[in-house]
Image (cartoon, helix red, strand yellow):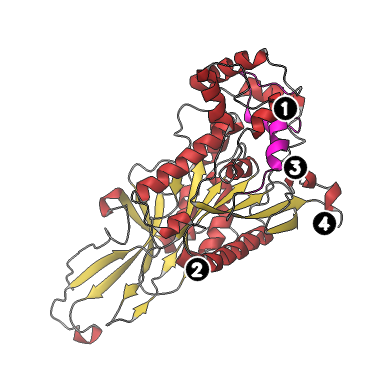
């Protein structure tokens, strides 16, 4: 039997045309270890791992695709001694189903875990967390990575990792969620990768800018309602950055440090602009729900004086951050600050998460923006008495926030993202979010 080959994957693969990939590997030839389950979907075709050319340590270095061999003519009954022509179609199971006859559709055979495991088999991807924490100059930081081809009819879920971590920390959760047909049908996963060592407010501003830039790039005319129903899930420090997307801070942080408004401070216009950029946040209108996981809203007791001193010696801040913080530190040195916590040119994210940081206590009291729903997942060692417990890094009293839609407690440690109960709670929240958006689509 002879076959003519034709590829029609440009459309179903979204922004990744066929020449984006360097090789295709049969998923069935690989064993998957280290994940709680192997996410597979039965259907027609053969699942393959599509490996991008020159793939770096990225979640999109390998994607799930499905190849289907379609005979031309009436089908198998027309097979005979004469040559038969066939077409090899390549589809993305993330974006479509395969049409058979007429309007009937059947699922594609898909393996979502194999490409993920293949990506995670690269040694360099496991170094991202520490290298980014130490501000390695070789990494492109502050960027949103799409975990799959963009689909305008699906709501994005943006995952923001914590300190000394990367998007690897979401592996088990993402693998499990991909096994949920409801999630695959209604949601798409995005991941934010950033330098977790620099001051919190710098990272928060970069996240805000990254969200704005991503939405603008995908929907320049602002007509896609699904991009205005964004869910952001933040773990630990990532939860603090997430919260800044949905707060109207005004002069809250400036008052916490100085007891005055920004206008009342006797500083140059340039310095006031620098401080305003670091401390004054307004809600992003695209974000409709935030989920906090083990977030130190009032600081972490692990951010001790010793830990902060060690972090300052280890972390290499970029030149522009050092220059900016030096200018602000000099300008505020003459002010009578209302706190013993000092802002210095060596301030890092560990300093920012100190329980003595007055800004954390101040913004912990601020409500979420109108129309934004919030959920919290808190790990504790003692479920019977959570008020006296914690996860080894963050105490319950610090992670708790009033006024949220729900608070879920789980008996676990700080790195609990792979806990089945935590994943199930995130899935429940996403089901609830879809129902709320379907009842009242669009911005509030």
Instruction: Report the residue marked by disc 1.
Output: 307
Label 3 and label 1: CA atoms lie apart by 15 Å
Tell me what residue is drawn at x 58 percent, y 16 percent: 267
> Which sits earlier in the primary sequence, circle 2 or circle 1?
1
Say left or right for 267 vs 442: right
Asked whether disc 4 touches disc 1, contact meaning CB atoms under 8 Å apart, the reply is no
> Which sits earlier in the primary sequence, circle 3 or circle 1?
1
Between 38 and 373, the one nearer to me in the picture? 373
- Label 1 crowd bin: few (<14), some (14–19), many (20+), radius 10 Å: few
User: In the rendered image, which quarter is residue 227 located in?
Assistant: bottom left
Label 2 and label 3: CA atoms lie apart by 35 Å
Instruction: Report the residue marked by disc 4.
Output: 383
Res. 439 visible in picture: yes
Instruction: Report the residue marked by disc 3.
Output: 394
Instruction: Report the residue marked by disc 2.
Output: 438
User: In the rendered image, which quarter is residue 71 located in?
Assistant: bottom left
Label 4 and label 2: CA atoms lie apart by 35 Å
- Label 3 crowd bin: few (<14), some (14–19), many (20+), radius 10 Å: many
The reply to whether the magenta stretch includes residue 100 is no
Between 55 and 336, the one nearer to me in the picture? 336
> Which sits earlier in the primary sequence, circle 4 or circle 1?
1
Segment colored magenta: 341-368
Asked whether disc 4 touches disc 2, contact meaning CB atoms under 8 Å apart, the reply is no
SS for callout 1: helix
Q: Which secondary structure class fits the magenta region best?
A: loop
Q: Position of residue 233 (x, y in %)?
A: 58, 51
Tell me what residue is drawn at x 50 percent, y 40 percent: 208
SS for callout 3: loop
């Amino acid at each position: 039997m002879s076959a003519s080959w034709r590829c029609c994957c440009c459309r179903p693969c979204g922004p990744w045309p066929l020449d984006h990939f360097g090789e295709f590997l049969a998923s069935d030839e690989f064993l998957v270890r280290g994940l709680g389950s192997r996410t597979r979907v039965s259907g027609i075709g053969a699942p393959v791992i599509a490996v991008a050319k020159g793939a770096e340590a990225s979640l999109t270095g390998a994607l799930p695709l499905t190849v289907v061999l379609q005979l031309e003519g009436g089908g198998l009954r027309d097979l005979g001694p004469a040559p038969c022509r066939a077409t090899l179609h390549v589809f993305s199971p993330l974006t479509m189903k395969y049409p058979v006859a007429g309007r009937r559709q059947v699922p594609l055979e898909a393996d979502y875990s194999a490409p993920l495991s293949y990506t995670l088999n690269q040694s360099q991807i496991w170094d991202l967390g520490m290298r980014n924490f130490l501000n390695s100059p070789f990494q492109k930081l502050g960027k949103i990575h799409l975990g799959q081809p963009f689909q305008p009819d699906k709501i994005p879920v943006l995952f923001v990792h914590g300190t000394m971590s990367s998007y690897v920390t979401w592996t088990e959760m993402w693998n499990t969620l991909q096994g949920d047909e409801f999630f695959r049908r209604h949601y798409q996963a995005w991941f934010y990768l950033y330098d977790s060592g620099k001051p919190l407010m710098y990272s928060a501003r970069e996240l805000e800018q990254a969200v704005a830039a991503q939405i603008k790039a995908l929907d320049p005319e602002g007509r896609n309602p699904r991009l205005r129903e964004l869910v952001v899930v933040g773990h630990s420090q990532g939860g603090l950055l997430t919260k800044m997307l949905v707060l109207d801070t005004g002069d809250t942080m400036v008052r916490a440090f100085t007891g005055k408004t920004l206008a009342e401070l006797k500083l140059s216009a340039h310095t006031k602009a620098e401080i305003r950029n670091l401390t004054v946040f307004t809600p992003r209108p695209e974000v409709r729900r935030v989920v906090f996981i083990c977030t130190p809203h009032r600081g972490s007791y692990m951010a001790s004086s010793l830990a902060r001193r060690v972090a300052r010696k280890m972390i290499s801040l970029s030149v522009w951050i050092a220059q900016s913080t030096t200018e602000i530190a000099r300008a505020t040195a003459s002010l009578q600050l209302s706190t013993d916590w000092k802002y210095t040119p060596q301030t890092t994210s560990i300093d920012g998460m100190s329980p003595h940081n007055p800004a954390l206590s101040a913004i912990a009291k601020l409500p979420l923006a109108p129309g934004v729903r919030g959920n919290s997942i808190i790990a504790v060692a003692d479920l019977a008495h959570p008020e006296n417990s914690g996860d080894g890094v963050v105490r319950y009293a610090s992670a708790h926030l009033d006024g949220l839609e729900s608070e879920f407690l789980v008996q676990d440690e700080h790195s609990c993202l792979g806990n089945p109960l935590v994943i199930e709670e995130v899935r429940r929240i996403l089901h609830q979010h879809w129902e709320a958006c379907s009842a009242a689509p669009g911005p509030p």
